[in-house]
Structures are given as C-alpha cells and as structure tokens.
Image (cartoon, coloured by chain):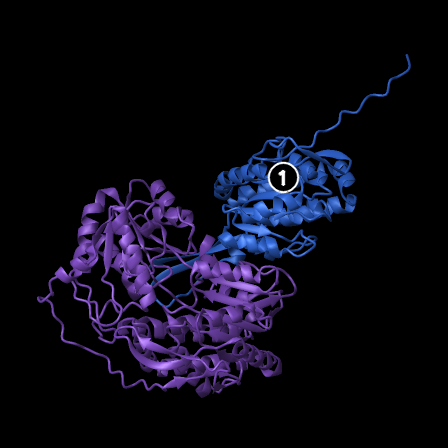
C-alpha cells in the first residue's frame, strides 16, 4: 500500500487557571483564528481571581532573585517554541522582541526596590524607608494587536513585582495567549500566578472590572474608551493602568506596585 | 436618656488633679466678618452671591462668613490658574519657583502662632497639637518641596519631568492647613498652578494663607481658593479645565470622584479612609505602647485617617494593657482647644459628632463593652469623651467602619499569623502599628501588613520627606517625599507610576 499521509494531532485550546487547562465551566466555545476556543464565563473568571489571590502571596514571598530566574525561564521556554509563536503573531521579529522583553523584565525583579524605593531623612530620631510592594491581583484586558508582544508587554511588568494576573485574552487573536500559557506551565511559574481566560471580551471585562478582589485593572489593550469599565473599577478603588503595548520601562512596572513606608525609632 | 448620656451625667468631676486654666491668647488672630473667594491674587465676591457661617466647634460661636463658590466661581478660579500657568509660572526658572516656596515656608514659621490659634479656633483641635504638629509640619512641607523645584531632573532621571497644568485639590477638615501644605507644596514645586477647595467647616486657615501668598509676592493666579461645601468640590472635579485632581477625604467620596473621572484620562490621586490596626505583642515595652495607643487614637480627637482605631492585643497581656489604658485615659484632659493643657479638643462639627454617636451606639447595641473616663464635657459645642470598647467582635460596625472620632476598639490575638490576618481583614490599608521588642518580628509584620505606612514602636509620625498614602480602598498615589512629586508631573509620554 502506498504511504498514508499521517493525520495531524490537533490541539484543543482551553483556559489556563491555577496552572491547569480546564474547559469553560459553561461548556461553551467560540470560533477564533480557525479554532474552537473556550468561551469563558464569569464563573471561570471568578475562579481565576480566587486562585490568583491564593497564588499571589506565595509568588510575592519568593525572593526577587528567584522570581527573576522564573521570568528568565519563561524566555528560555519561549525560545524553544519560536516557530509555533511566529505563526500566531506578526512573525519572527515579534517573537524575538517578546522573548527579549521577558529577559529584560527578569533582570528588574531584584532591582525595583533600589530604583523605586528610598531611605527618608525624617526630622527626628527615626529610621524611615520606603519600599515597593505588589498591589495584589491584577486584571489585564489583553490587546488584539500585537497579539503576542502586546500581551507580554502588559503581563511581564505586572508579575515581575510579585502580582498575580488574570488575563482576558484577545477575543479575535487568542491563540498566542494559550500558547504562552503552555510556556508558563513548563517554566516554574507557580500555578495561579498567571491565569488566562478566553472568550467574549464584552461579556467578561465588566465582571473583571467590578470584581472586589481585584486590585488593579490594566486597560492598555482597549482600543475604544474604557469609561464604563473604569467606573465599575472605582467600586473598590482599583488602580487603573494604561501603558505601552510595544515598549518596556521600569515605569511600566511601577503602576502595579504600592509603596510602603516603615518607621522605627532610633535609640538605645 | 441613652445609656451613654447616663454614664456621662454620672461621671464625677475629677477634683484631685485640677490644672489652672492656661489659655492661649486669641487676640493674635483678627478675622474679617466675611471672606470672598481668592481668585487671581485677590479676594472677590462670589458670583453665586451665597455665603455661609463658619463656627468655633468648641462653643458654636460664629467666627466669620465664607463664600459658597458656585459653578461660575469655580470656572473663574480654574481660568485664573490656567492663565497663571501659561503666562509665567510654568516658564519661570525653577530656581525662582523654589524661592517662592522657601518664602512661604519662612512666613508660615514667622506667623505660626497666629495660624495655630486660628486652626484651633476653627477646627476644635488642641492648641498643643496645632502649635507643635500642624504648623511646624506645614512649614516643613513647603521648605522640603521648595528644594525639589529646581532638582526634578535628579528625582526622575531620563524621564524629562514636566508640570501637568492646573491641579484641582480638595482637602479635609482634620488638618486644614497641613493638608493644604501637603497639596500645594508639591504641586507648585512641580510647576503646576492650583485651585484648592478647603473643607466646608474649616476654611479660615486657608483664607489666612492667602495673606501669606500676598506677603510672599507669589504671582497672581498661581494659587486660587474656592470655599464651599461638597457641591463646590464636585464642580471642581468635573471641570474640564483641571488636569489633575488630588483628593483627601472619605472613601465614599473618593469612589464618586474616581467614577466621575472614569474615561477622561485626567489624573487622580486619592487619600481616603482607614481603619488601622495597632498590634501589641506580649514582649512590647508596655508603657511606651500605651502612649502609642493613646497617641494613635486620641490624637486630634481621632479625626485622623490613619488613626489606630483597632487595637489588637496579644491575649497574654490583655488584662494589663486594658487596665493601663483605662488608667491613662483618666489623665487625658478634654476641653477648651485653646488651653495649653488640653489633650483632646472639640469634635469638628455637629455632623461628625452625630456620626460618632451613631457608631458608638451601634457598638453598645451589638454587645461591646464601653468605657469612658470620668470627665465633664462643656455644655456648648461638640464634644465626645475618649472611648474604649472591649469585647469587640471583628464583625461589629465599630471594628469595620471608620469612626473618625476618639473611639478605640480592643480585640485580641494569639499568634502573629492571627494578628496579620485580623489586621488585614478590612477593605482599607492606610496605616498600621506594631509594638514588640523583637527586631525580626517587626520586619516580618511590616512586610505582611497590607498598608502604606507602618509605624513600629511608634505611631502617627509624619514628615515631609516620608511618603504617605494607602493600599486598597484607602486610595492611591503618595504624598510626601520624592514619590509625592510624581502625581504632579508628566514624563515623556510614558506611564506614571503608583497611581496618580
């Protein structure tokens, strides 16, 4: 018999929550980039916030050196999947920028406190210093374009300082996000530090914006105005973050951080 | 008669430790009968034509009438600030800008007694505090930020800092002049101009501050003042000519402001409410801790957003802490704010007194045990005795809600983990206190408490070089220090940090 062409084994695209790849609890899917994508529900989103909250304190408790190494490990794992990623975004150049962005942010983990913190010369016998700390759980509305670099440009600065993230993936170009989830799953990123929900943004974003256990909302990925979401975000005084989709800066990290100032008397 | 009133009337007059009256002379302050709005460097009649009285809360005597700024008045003030920004202030050499701020600091120092008396008259706070805390800190704030005005490039290297334009600033009534300084000093140092709205009940020190600006020869329109109630603040918030809003006040109003600014891209910093935990471990130096607890909650009648209103005591030392605390409370002198021996002054307003009374009644109704030291409160004016609640459950309103009065809730814990969990169990995150002799425990607690300011073995310390501001629903952005400049600057089109 002549050779029978081998049938390709296709991938099922699912959500990424708590380090696992569940289907949407709703059982729904939608079509994007020619694939059946999980159409996440608000229940999926709430699950993601819950596991993000419990993962966040452990992630923040790692040493900064350790977090830096894990981010670097993400870059290593992406490097091994360059070909796959190139097919899911604008091409190889975007993949290279995205990998290098992880490397760049990996190096920030143990430098943030020195660049963003301070020792404060108060008028009195007190030792006083200010250090940056993570704000907690960050909601990210991922941009449609650039599909890979845009997501990483928002996610890397959010997690490098010790936050956990819940990402609503691009509705029209979600494959890069799920491919990236597979990288996280093999990069020593603790489960729950990054969670990715695919689905209809209009359906999911309002719940993320209004969720009372989310500390910050990144709206950089939205094309139109975000007034309605920002209004909902005020219910628990969320930090609204608007940053770059194609750049890197320590000032992209800082909006995801709080500043803590500690006083102690000096004396015998 | 409520239970509370019965206790009050039954309180014996303490006779064994009387002090001779030691009133600060009030004739150093001379007030106008009526104040207009300060716009473009001069006092103008409000276009609204409306005025309202401002009083001395310790005796309800009217002190003066102040203007209720309407929409047109706010617009005029914003236009004046815009003009000053564009025609002079933003183009002024930063070193010269610095010198104006140094001048303001010096004049405040020179006139500090006058300001201190006025602050106590209009706000009800003890003269000891306005004299020793509010005034020195307000002057220090201007002096500190003055020095930054021509050094912004060093504060933010490679970011090309630029002023935003017109800052709209809304301040509370608990530290009227100090909050003015916290707002105006960094805004001007960064090169912005300002429209400031003082609190409805405490406008007088801000109005007197306009005379300091005159003496300092600050260019007209750089600082404008609109007095009024919440309606004036709302006008300022929604005014499109304002580039940045800085608000200090309640979380409820802060959320409303955040909603109002949603989608506008206008910058915002919020310094909101708190329900701070003050945590005492069994190895703490107890007498020092007692002083810290008292300072933490009775300072400024508890009208302090970062007040240590939830006391967490390790179970093994609960008895001695509570008995020492009650004994210390008996020595607090409540009364005339202008008396130099007064520790606790008048409640700022009738509205605030009503709120405190309502929450205290809720605490009693929910089952907490109330203690108030014997003290006779003046008949006129707004007064509330220093209060301690024991037998408090975390779910009680007095343990959850910001009372903003001299009311302490005492709770207990066994392990550090339990202390952290209980302390963080609040939507607020402004400040926290830790008392222990063990250094490693201080640092562990400091890193696990979710609050913007941690006082270890001290409480309620403030300094212009020390960033202040909250986590969670206590707001975002910092005031004080290098970080306090950031909310008033734009950077090369790149994202600003830490909110604001």
> Toward which corner of the image does residue B138 lie, by quadrant?
bottom left
Picture coordinates of residue B371 (x, y %)? Answer: 20, 54
A34 to the left or right of A249? right
Q: Which chain is purple?
A: B
Give the residue furthest to the right.
A2
Picture coordinates of residue B417 (x, y %)? Answer: 36, 41
Q: Looking at the picture, does residue A180 appear above or below residue B48?
A: above
Give the residue furthest to the top.
A1
B416 to the left or right of B374? right
Decide which of A251, B391 is in the foreground and name it.
B391
Q: Residue at x 48, y 86 (%)?
A: B44
Is disc 1 surrounded by few (<14), some (14 to 19) or many (20+) residues within 10 Å?
A: many
> For chain A, what colour was chosen?
blue
| Label 1: element kind | strand
Q: Quadrant of the C terminus of chain A?
A: bottom left
Q: Give the residue at mark 1.
A: A197
Picture coordinates of residue B134 (x, y %)? Answer: 35, 72
Picture coordinates of residue B231 (x, y %)? Answer: 48, 70
């Amino acid at each position: 018999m002549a050779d029978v062409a081998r049938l390709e084994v296709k991938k099922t695209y699912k959500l990424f929550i708590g380090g696992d790849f569940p289907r949407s609890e709703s059982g729904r899917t939608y079509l994007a980039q020619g694939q059946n994508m999980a159409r996440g529900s608000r229940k999926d989103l709430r699950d993601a916030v819950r596991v993000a909250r419990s993962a966040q304190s452990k992630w923040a408790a790692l040493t900064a050196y350790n977090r830096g190494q894990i981010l670097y490990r993400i870059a290593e794992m992406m490097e091994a999947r360059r070909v796959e990623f190139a097919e899911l975004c604008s091409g190889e150049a975007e993949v290279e920028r995205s990998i290098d962005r992880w490397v760049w942010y990996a190096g920030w983990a143990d430098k943030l406190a020195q660049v963003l913190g301070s020792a404060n010369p108060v008028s009195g016998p007190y030792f006083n210093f200010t250090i940056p700390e993570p704000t907690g759980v960050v909601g990210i509305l991922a941009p449609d374009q650039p599909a890979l670099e845009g997501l990483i440009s928002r996610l890397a600065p959010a997690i490098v300082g010790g936050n956990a993230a819940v990402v609503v993936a691009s509705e029209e170009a979600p494959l890069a996000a799920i491919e990236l989830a597979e990288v996280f799953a093999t990069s020593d990123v603790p489960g729950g530090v990054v969670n990715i929900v695919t689905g209809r943004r209009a359906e999911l974003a309002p719940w993320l914006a209004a969720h009372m256990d989310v500390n910050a909302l990144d709206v950089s990925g939205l094309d139109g105005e975000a007034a309605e979401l920002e209004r909902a975000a005020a219910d628990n005084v969320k930090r609204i973050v608007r940053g770059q989709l194609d750049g890197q800066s320590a000032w992209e990290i800082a909006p995801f951080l709080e500043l803590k100032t500690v006083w102690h008397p000096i004396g015998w | 008669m409520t239970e509370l009133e019965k206790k009050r009337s039954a309180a014996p007059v303490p006779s064994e430790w009387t002090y001779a009256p030691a009133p600060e002379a009030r004739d150093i302050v001379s007030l106008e009968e009526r104040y207009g709005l300060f716009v473009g460097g001069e006092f103008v009649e409000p276009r609204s034509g409306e005025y309202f009285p401002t009083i001395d809360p310790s005796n309800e005597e009217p002190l003066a009438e102040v203007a209720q700024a309407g929409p047109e008045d706010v617009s005029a003030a914003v236009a004046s600030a815009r003009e000053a920004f564009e025609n002079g202030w933003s183009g002024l050499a930063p070193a010269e800008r610095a010198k104006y701020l140094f001048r303001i600091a010096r004049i405040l120092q020179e006139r500090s007694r006058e300001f201190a008396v006025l602050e106590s008259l209009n706000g009800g706070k003890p003269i000891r505090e306005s004299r020793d805390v509010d005034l020195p800190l307000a002057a220090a704030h201007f002096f500190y930020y003055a020095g930054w005005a021509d050094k912004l490039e060093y504060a933010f290297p490679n970011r090309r800092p630029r002023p935003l334009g017109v800052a709209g600033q809304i301040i509370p009534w608990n530290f009227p002049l100090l909050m003015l300084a916290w707002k105006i000093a960094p805004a001007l140092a960064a090169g912005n101009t300002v429209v400031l709205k003082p609190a409805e009940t405490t406008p007088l020190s801000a109005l007197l501050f306009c005379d300091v600006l005159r003496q300092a020869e600050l260019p007209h329109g750089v600082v404008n003042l609109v007095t009024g109630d919440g309606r004036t603040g709302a006008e300022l918030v929604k005014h499109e000519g304002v580039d940045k809003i800085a608000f200090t006040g309640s979380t409820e109003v802060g959320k409303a402001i955040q909603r109002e600014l949603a989608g506008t891209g206008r910058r915002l910093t919020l310094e909101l409410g708190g329900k701070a935990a003050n945590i005492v471990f069994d190895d703490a130096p107890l007498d020092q801790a007692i002083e810290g607890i008292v300072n933490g909650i009775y300072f400024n009648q508890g009208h302090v957003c970062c007040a240590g209103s939830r006391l967490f005591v390790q179970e093994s030392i609960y008895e001695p802490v509570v008995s020492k605390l009650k004994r210390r409370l008996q020595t607090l002198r409540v009364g005339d704010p202008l008396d130099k021996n007064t520790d606790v002054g008048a409640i700022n307003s009738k509205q605030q007194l009503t709120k405190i009374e309502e929450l205290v009644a809720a605490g009693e109704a929910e089952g907490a045990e109330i203690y108030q030291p014997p003290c006779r409160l003046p008949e006129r004016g707004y007064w509330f005795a220093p209060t301690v609640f024991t037998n408090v459950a975390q779910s009680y309103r007095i343990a959850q809600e910001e009372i903003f009065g001299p009311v302490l809730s005492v709770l207990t814990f066994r392990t550090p983990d339990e202390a952290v969990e209980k302390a963080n169990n609040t939507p607020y995150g402004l400040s926290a206190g830790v008392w222990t002799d063990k250094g490693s425990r201080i640092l562990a607690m400091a890193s696990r408490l979710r609050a913007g300011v941690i006082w270890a073995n001290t409480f309620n310390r403030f300094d212009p070089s020390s960033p202040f501001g909250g986590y969670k629903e206590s707001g975002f952005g910092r005031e004080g220090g290098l970080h306090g400049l950031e909310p008033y600057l734009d950077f090369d089109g790149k994202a600003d940090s830490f909110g604001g």
